[in-house]
Image (cartoon, rainbow, N blue to C red):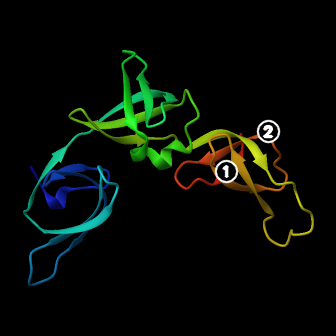
Amino acid sequence: MVNVTELRPGNFFIEEGNIYQVLDILLNKTAMRKMVAKVKVKNMRTGAVTEIARNSGYGIENIRLDKNTMQYLYDTGDFLVFMNQETYEQIEISKERLQWECQFLKGEELVDITSYEGEILGITLPAKVALKIVDCDPAVRGDTVNKAMKDATLETGLKVRVPLFIENGETVNVRTDNGEYDGRA
């Protein structure tokens, strides 16, 4: 158990059966009250971001999550299959839990799988992934007052805005945090 005021961004703790990741913490001390810790947290099971407030001295059960690097193999329709590179053990994760991440997985990528006591909480993608453009609008000259962009569909089905000079068949880097174009690969 640790004091709530000792939490830092990136720490994980368990409270009332929920696993939380600390995103931010604000300590507030006034002359007449105990210190209050306002902690912005992300529920690791649901992905919901909330803020909790606790008085100084409140005990929190600090935990460590396991991270294993695994290779994405294939999509079964309802599940995504990953394999441990060392033991060749395969696991399946429901597609419903990984809707955002599915847009960046095409096969054989290495991802970090986060788990706690055998329960899989999610995956961590690399910051950028290289994906091939399968369909994009032709470039239209004339609208160059601002950054000229056009729509493109990538091999995973993700739709992004790319500059006019990008053509079908090219490979581009896409950021996994917001799904935006980040340059040629």
At 92% from the left edge and 63% from the top edge, which residue is drawn?
141
At 39% from the left edge and 46% from the top edge, which residue is drawn?
97
- Local packing at callout 1 (Cα closer than 10 Å; few below 14, some 14-19, many 20+) is some
Q: In the displayed structure, does residue 168 sit left or right of residue 142?
A: left
Q: According to the image, label 2 marks what residue?
A: 169
Amino acid at circle 2? Gly
| Residue 38 shows up from this direction | no
- Name the element at disc 1: strand
| Residue 72 shows up from this direction | yes
Q: Looking at the image, is mark 2 or mark 1 earlier in the sequence? A: 2
Amino acid at circle 1? Asp
At 62% from the left edge and 41% from the top edge, which residue is drawn?
156
Calculate the distance from the C-alpha at mark 2 to the C-alpha at mark 1. Answer: 16 Å
Nearer to us of marks 2 and 1 is 2
Percent x, y of residue 10: 32, 51
Q: Front-most of 31 and 51? A: 51
Identify the image quadrant of the C terminus: top right
Q: Which mark is residue 182?
A: 1
From this viewpoint, which residue is outermost toward the bottom? 32
